[in-house]
Amino acid sequence: MRCPRCESESLWKNGKRQLSSGQVVQYYHCKDCHKRFNERAGTPMHRIKVSTEKVATVLRSRSEGLGLRAAGRVSGSSHSSVARWEARLAAHQENWSPTPSPESEVTLEGDELYTKVGKNRPAHESEG
Ligand SMILES: [Zn+2]
């Protein structure tokens, strides 16, 4: 496990939390740059609201030749979800860099503490 910001391996464990999906995630605190993050930070999974295991199972099915609908049935997800996961992962493989921009830390899924960082922007700048 490394810090997603400075790649330091000097980390404190910072407790565990259970996501809405039921998955328990270990949190860390970097001793060097003091960034706090969870074990899914820096992976394509950190913005997907389903368990990593579920996505991995579905995408493995897809790589073995299953169609979108069949792969969705394996996991109980819709074929549109499967398509979205594939698109996300493809985008991350092209764009991922080991030193994400400071804004990236407000996008950690399932952690309201961090999603409140940077909320003080004018309303017209918010998405949606
Ligand atoms: Zn760090």
Image (cartoon, rainbow, N blue to C red):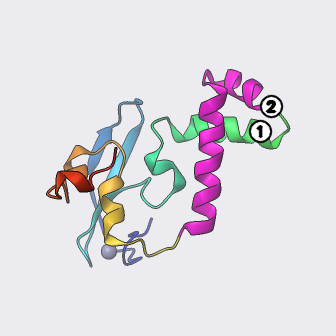
Instruction: Classify 10 Å Cα crowding around label 1: few (below 14), some (14-19), many (20 and above).
Output: some
Q: Secondary structure at mark 1?
A: helix
Ligand 1 visible in quadrant: bottom left
Question: Image check: 72 left or right of 15?
Answer: right
Residue 114 appears anywhere in the view: no
| Quadrant showing the N terminus | bottom left
Q: Amino acid at mark 1?
A: Arg
Looking at the picture, does residue 34 appear above or below residue 106?
Answer: below
What is the magenta range? 67-96
Q: Amino acid at mark 2?
A: Gly
User: According to the image, label 2 marks what residue?
Assistant: 67
Q: Secondary structure at mark 2?
A: loop
Decide which of 38, 89 is in the foreground and name it.
89
Looking at the picture, does residue 99 appear above or below residue 57?
Answer: below
User: According to the image, label 1 marks what residue?
Assistant: 62
- Identify the mark nearer the N-term, 2 or 1: 1
